Each structure stands twice: as structure tokens, then as C-alpha cells.
Amino acid sequence: MKRTEERQRLNRLWWFWLALCLLPWILFGPLDVNLGLPPIAIFITGLFALFPSLKAFSSFKRALFALQERDPAGERARWATLQRAQVIGLYWAAVPAWLAALGSLSGLGGVACLLLVFGSLMTLILYRIPRQVL
């Protein structure tokens, strides 16, 4: 596959994870259900859940830098490494938004849920494949 096609494929994967990140919060947010979980504990857990994603960013960054090498022999392996690092980072970036969905079912306030969702969105943006990767 060409580099442009690989980049587009990884960007489609990023959009999929963006939808997967936001959809639970959009669907569960308006429901008026109380699961009985402590909302402040969910919020604090969501804040701490931002840190593993930032740790995973270093492997994503290294995989991006490895793509600068123009050796066609290891091209597929470098793209596979980048995809693996991106998916791990996107998973960890989505966790605070998923906890916001769980928190909204437990009585967590709207502002706290928005903080967790925006934290996830800002972290998700880090894992986009830049245009310079062609």
C-alpha cells in the first residue's frame, strides 16, 4: 500500500475511535438513572485515566519518527507499529469519556462530565496522523 493510503486508513481509524469515545456519553447522558456509584470517585478516576494515554504517546511519537526512514523493506512493519501505538493511545484517551458516561448515570454533574469528555477529546487529537506523514 502507498503511504497516502496507509495514512488515510489510520485517519479513518481515528474517526472511528472518536465516535466510539463520544457515543456512550451522548447516549447515556440524557438518561435519568442512578447506579449508586459515588460520582466524585468516578470523576477522580477519570482525571487519573488521562495519564496512561500520555505515557502511550511516547511510543506513538517514536513510531511516527520511524516512518521518516524511507527503506521499503520494513515499511509494512513500521505502519503496523504505528497503528498498534495509535490504537493503544486512543483506547486510553477514550477512557475518561467512557467514565463520564458512567458518571452521568451515577449523578455526576454536567460540568464534571464535560471536563472528562473534553480531556478525552484533547488527548485524542494528539493521536491524529499528521499531514506531513506521506
Image (tube, rainbow, N blue to C red):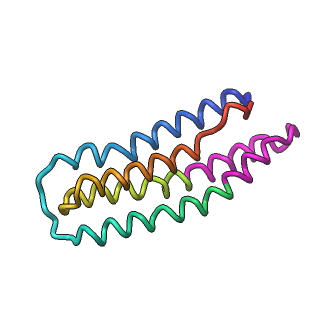
- Main SS, magenta region, reads helix
Q: Tell me the residue at 21%/70% (across/down).
A: 37
* Closer to us: 67 or 44: 44
Q: Is residue 59 above or below residue 26?
A: below
User: Is 78 covered by the magenta stretch?
Assistant: yes
Report the magenta residues as a range: 60-87
Q: How far across and down, in percent of the image, does residue 17 sit? A: 46, 43
Q: Residue at x 24, y 52 (%)?
A: 110
User: Can you name the residue that lies furthest to the front here?
Assistant: 111
Query: Can you say which quadrant of the picture contains the C terminus?
Result: top right
Instruction: State the image quarter where residue 4 is shown.
Output: top right
Side of 36 where 71 appears, left or right: right
Residue 96 pos. (x, y %) = 40, 58
Which residue appears farthest toward the right when viewing the image?
Answer: 71
Could you tell whether 122 is left or right of 32 in the image? right
In front: 83, or 36? 36
Q: In front here: 76 or 120?
A: 120
Based on the displayed image, in which of its 4 quarters is residue 102 positioned?
A: bottom left
Q: Nearer the viewer, residue 1 or 11?
A: 11
> On the rendered structure, is 9 left or right of 105?
right
Q: Where's residue 125, x and y in %? A: 54, 43
In x, y percent, where is residue 64? Answer: 73, 46
Q: Residue at x 11, y 53 (%)?
A: 32
Based on the displayed image, in which of its 4 quarters is residue 52 positioned? Answer: bottom right
> Which quarter of the rendering shows the N terminus?
top right
Query: Residue at horizontal 53%, vertical 39%?
Result: 13
